[in-house]
Image (tube, coloured by chain):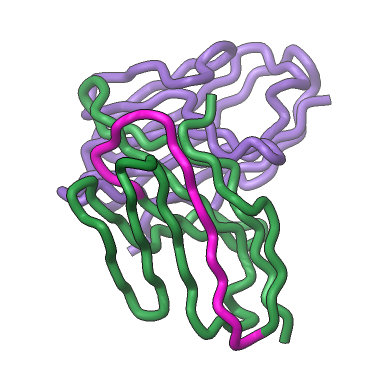
């Protein structure tokens, strides 16, 4: 099993450009999440999806949009990138009774 | 705002010693989880302790939970150089339609050979 797969792994954007981060999981999990990780800040929840067809805002949703394309895929879109969105983005999924999350390897985004 | 806060922020020990990391949180929780992150990698789940549990063991890991003090500790016994990583606590609260985990800022553990 691949688990949670994120693409791309690295991306450099200029201010104002748009891009989409892709995430797919093969564990048949209902819930999927997007976090960002900044130095000294831990992980902060951007958006999450409890099930196919539903999405909800997390702690830091401004400047982002998401799409739960199907049960496997959850994408994160930056419509007009800003330097403050330079970060490492992690996708995660969860679905077991016990509540642990499974993370992808991260997508490192730099906005110039 | 951070629900969980780890202490210390950084810890350096010799191989074979025990490492203890602490986590404090602010609101009532369903469970508390610990994750490990190697440099440049994603987070990996280590152990989960429910709000009605006080102690849990998994291999060289021991987790305690004190809900009256809103705190938890992670003990790694007989540490190895390969344990060098960042460790995060995460608290789960009931909110909305999905489980949500709130992460602390982490403890950077360095185990010296």
Residue B23 higher or lower than B10, as above or below? above
| x, y percent for residue B70 | 38, 40
* Residue A103 falls inside the magenta stretch: no
Q: Is residue A64 left or right of residue A96?
A: right
Q: Is residue B62 left or right of residue A71?
A: right
Is residue A28 visible in the rendered structure shown here? no
Determine the colour of chain B.
green
Q: In the rendered image, which quarter contains the C terminus of chain B?
A: bottom right
Q: Is residue B70 left or right of residue B16?
A: left
* Residue B22 falls inside the magenta stretch: yes
| x, y percent for residue A1 | 32, 64
| x, y percent for residue B15 | 65, 85
Name the residue at 66% across, 58% down. B108
Q: In the rendered image, which quarter contains the N terminus of chain B?
A: top right
Dividing the picture into quadrants, the one containing residue A92 is top left
B13 or A30: which is nearer to us? B13
Name the residue at 80% across, 22% down. A14
B96 or B106: which is nearer to us? B106
Name the residue at 38% across, 70% down. B62
Name the residue at 33% across, 53% down. B65
Q: Is residue B106 left or right of residue B44?
A: right
The purple one among the chains is: A
Numbered marks: total: 0
Q: Residue furthest right?
A: A112
Dividing the picture into quadrants, the one containing residue A56 is top left
The stretch in magenta equals: B15-32
Is residue A69 visible in the rendered structure shown here? yes
């Amino acid at each position: 099993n691949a688990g949670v797969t994120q693409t791309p792994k690295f991306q450099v954007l200029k201010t104002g450009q748009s891009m989409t981060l892709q995430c797919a999981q093969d564990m048949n999990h209902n819930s999927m999440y997007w976090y960002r990780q900044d130095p000294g800040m831990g992980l902060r929840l951007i958006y999450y999806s409890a099930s196919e067809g539903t999405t909800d805002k997390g702690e830091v949703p401004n400047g982002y949009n998401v799409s739960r394309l199907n049960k496997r895929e959850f994408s994160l879109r930056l419509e007009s990138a800003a330097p403050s969105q330079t970060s490492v983005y992690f996708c995660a999924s969860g679905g077991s009774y016990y509540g642990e999350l499974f993370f992808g390897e991260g997508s490192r985004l730099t906005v110039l | 705002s951070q629900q969980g806060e780890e202490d210390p922020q950084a810890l350096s020990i010799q191989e074979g010693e025990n490492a203890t990391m602490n986590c404090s949180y602010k609101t009532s929780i369903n469970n508390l989880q610990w994750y490990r992150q190697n440099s440049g990698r994603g987070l990996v789940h280590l152990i989960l302790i429910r709000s009605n549990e006080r102690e849990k063991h998994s291999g060289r890991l021991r987790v305690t939970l004190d809900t009256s003090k809103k705190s938890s500790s992670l003990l790694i016994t007989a540490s190895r150089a390969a344990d060098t990583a960042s460790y995060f606590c995460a608290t789960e609260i009931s909110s909305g339609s999905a489980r949500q985990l709130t992460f602390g800022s982490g403890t950077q553990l360095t185990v010296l050979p």
